[in-house]
Image (cartoon, rainbow, N blue to C red):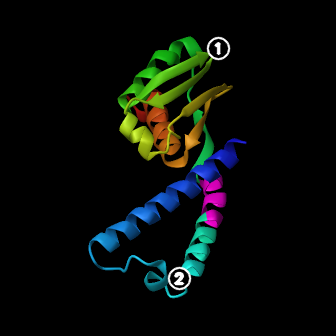
Amino acid sequence: MKYLVRAIKYFFWFSILFALIMVALVLLGIADSSPELMFRDGWKSVAYIAVLFGAVAAFYPKFGFITKDVVIPGGYSDIRDGVVEVMESRGYRLESEEGEDMTFRLRSKVSAIFKMLEDRITLTRTEGGFAAEGLTKEVVRIAGALEYRFRDRSLDGE
């Protein structure tokens, strides 16, 4: 269900972005305001564009969201505060904590809106650390930060 909701959100986001670009072109006098004159095949072209947006929106959630293992040695009580500290330094706040699983959201509402309110990062406790789930770019960035923060410094010669 979450996948379908994300796909619909992206379809509307692409459509709104397209409409804003077309309005800007009309206001600047670059394009005519009639779809019959703006596009070669008029409204038929608009339908083709909508189908293209639908196809992209249908597949984007598959590639735009991941679950990645984050290796963090130690017990939960030993690493919890450090995890929260890293997430807060990246602009996230702790939304909820259930047992050893944590959910974070962006503090900035503007950033959250630009991410279409898909700003949630879920850290589910695993044997070797956490499984981080969320937007691909954010999960990769946060996984790197967490692993760097908790890396075994004895292996670095320190």
Q: In the figure, residue 134 lies in which quadrant? A: top right
Q: Helix or strand or loop: what does disc 1 sit on?
A: loop
Q: Which mark is residue 13?
A: none
Is 60 colored magenta in this rendering? Answer: yes
List the single residue furthest toward the right. 1
- In depth, the one of 52 and 134 nearer the eye is 52
- In depth, the one of 27 and 2 nearer the eye is 27
User: Which mark is in front, 1 or 2?
Assistant: 2
Which residue is label 2 attached to? 42
Query: Residue placed at 63% from the left, 53% from the top?
Result: 7
- In depth, the one of 53 and 66 nearer the eye is 53
x, y percent for residue 47: 61, 74
Q: Amino acid at mark 1?
A: Gly
Which residue is label 1 attached to? 99
Query: Residue placed at 48% from the left, 30% from the top?
Result: 105
Query: Residue placed at 55% from the left, 28% from the top?
Result: 72
Q: Is residue 151 visible?
A: no
Q: Which residues are magenta?
A: 54-63
